[in-house]
Image: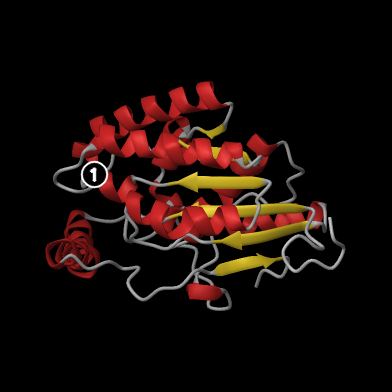
Amino acid sequence: MAAHDELDGPFEKRYVALGDSFTEGVGDIDPSSPNGVRGWADRVAAQLIENDDTWGYANLAIRGKKFQQVLDEQLDAALALKPTLVTIYAGGNDILRPVVNLDGIMERYRWALEKLVESGARVVVFTGFDSGKAPMFRATRGRTAIYNEYIRKFVDDLDLDLVDFWHMKHFQDWRYWDPDRMHLSIEGHILMAKEVLRVLGEKDEIAEPELQDPPVSSLPERVFAEAVWTKDYLYPWVKRRVTRKSSGDHMTHKYPKLTHRIW
């Protein structure tokens, strides 16, 4: 390896994160970070770099992206960075659509994972979250279960690492979620970072997230809160679906090139 090569040096180890809002870090608000969010992947990268300063990090994930967009816009860019570690979680935005060809998506997912494995990278994938206790997303629980069965098969066949989001039942606590109820909160991203580091077998010095006591609210307060959530979050989300717009339109990759400086 050339000591001064712009791509490979000084990064002997190269972590590239792919996906949508989950991996971009939406919900983990940090005005000092690119796109105004930090997220579990940035936190994992920071710990990896703390453990070993030969790590470089790129995050290509952008909120709102459907599965094919992740492949079209991120896969080749990731491979060009010659990753030694890749995390990828995609397809959640497709599952939420009224109609989805899940078998077709997962066939392409396997192809993408094979490409990543062939590159020599260690690949980490995620099962989908169990939405059985989330009223808005309960109807998609069956789709997510099918998605997960595919993921588990890919893990067995391709020797991937798995972060089993479905069985992380502590995430049923809404304090780990953003007020929009669609993305992890700061505390949720911290907890996910710790889980990814555990799967990787890496030293984890990230402090445990501290949860506030849940507020005690009356029925009128809960009804008012539901109305506010509908106006502030549900209605804009539905409007974007109807108008075929995305929250990620005009967004750019947080860290398109390998770096060890994470803001």
Quadrant location, the C terminus: bottom right
Label 1 sits on residue = 137
Whether residue 33 sits left or right of residue 231 in the image: it is: right
Q: Residue at 21% of width from left, 43% of height from top?
A: 135
Q: Which of 218 and 49 is in front in this view?
A: 49
Task: Tell me where residue 16 sits by quadrant.
Answer: bottom right
Q: Could you tell whether 161 is left or right of 95 in the image?
A: right
Q: Does residue 112 show up?
A: yes
Image position, residue 259 (x, y; %): 69, 67
Q: Determine whether 141 is above or below 226 in the image.
A: above
Q: How is the image coloured?
A: secondary structure
Q: Quadrant of residue 255?
A: bottom right
Quadrant of the rendered image containing residue 200: top right
Indicate left or right for 232 with 112 as reference: left
* Residue 215 visible at all: no
Of the pair 64 and 40, the residue shown nearer to us: 64
Location of the N terminus (image quadrant): bottom right
Residue at the far right in the pictured view: 3
Q: Which of 250 and 41 is in front in this view?
A: 250
Amino acid type at mark 1: Phe
**Residue 154, above or below 218:** above
Give percent across and percent down for residue 64: 33, 60
Position above or below: 236 against 142:
below
Mark 1 Cα-neighbour bin, 10 Å: few <14, some 14–19, many ≥20: some
Tag count in the figure?
1
In this rendering, position of residue 255 left or right of residue 131: right
